[in-house]
Image (cartoon, rainbow, N blue to C red):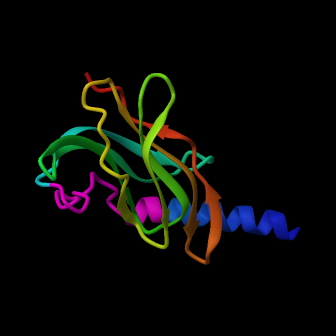
């Protein structure tokens, strides 16, 4: 068996185990970026690896941030760790707003964005680290458009 095959088998097994052991649900209510008040849920969807293993939840919120109405995206990963995991708010023209890259964590948000006057959705892409520090690619994940 080649090293590449061993890594792929280990990654698949790790993702399957993580999905089984972790009740991967929506992020907690304390997912507000700095300067923002209580988050208000918009929508959410699962986060999946390229092998269709669910590893987390992507959620879109809105709320008041420093007196301004804003929205943001939140990533919650089960037992996986972010590694070049990008989260953002996307508008129908394809532009990504408030993009942040998560590294070495399993809960993080995009920057609050001034896009409340448009239809938006949360977006996640990139890679994660499974147990054993194996890099696993994510499918691009998006929630439904709001509004």
Rendered-image quadrant of the N terminus: bottom right
**Left or right: 54 with respect to 39?**
right
Task: Please give the name of the residue rendered at 22% of the width and 57% of the height, measured from the top-left corner.
Answer: 32
User: Residue 145: where, in percent of width, then height?
Assistant: 35, 26
Quarter holding residue 33: bottom left
Up/down of 33 relative to 132, above or below: above
The stretch in magenta equals 18-36
Up/down of 132 relative to 39, above or below: below
Task: Please give the name of the residue rendered at 29% of the width and 38% of the height, measured from the top-left corner.
Answer: 114
Question: Please, what is the dominant secondary structure of the magenta stretch?
Answer: loop
Q: Can residue 42 be seen in this view?
A: yes
Quarter holding residue 108: bottom left
- Residue closer to the observer: 18 or 111: 111
User: Residue 42: where, in percent of width, then height?
Assistant: 22, 36
Task: Please give the name of the residue rendered at 27% of the width and 51% of the height, measured from the top-left corner.
Answer: 26
**Left or right: 6 with respect to 103?**
right
- Residue closer to the observer: 20 or 64: 64
**Left or right: 92 with respect to 42?**
right
């Amino acid at each position: 068996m080649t090293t590449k095959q061993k890594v792929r088998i280990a990654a698949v097994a790790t993702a399957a185990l993580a999905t089984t052991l972790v009740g991967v649900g929506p992020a907690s209510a304390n997912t507000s970026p700095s300067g923002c008040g209580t988050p208000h849920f918009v929508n959410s969807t699962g986060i999946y690896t390229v092998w269709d293993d669910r590893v987390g939840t992507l959620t879109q919120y809105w709320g008041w941030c420093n007196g301004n109405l804003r929205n943001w995206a939140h990533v919650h990963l089960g037992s996986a760790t972010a590694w070049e995991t990008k989260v953002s708010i996307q508008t129908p023209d394809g532009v990504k707003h408030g993009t942040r890259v998560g590294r070495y964590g399993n809960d993080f948000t995009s920057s609050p964005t001034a896009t409340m006057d448009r239809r938006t959705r949360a977006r996640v892409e990139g890679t994660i680290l499974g147990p054993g520090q194996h890099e696993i690619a994510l499918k691009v994940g998006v929630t439904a458009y709001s509004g």
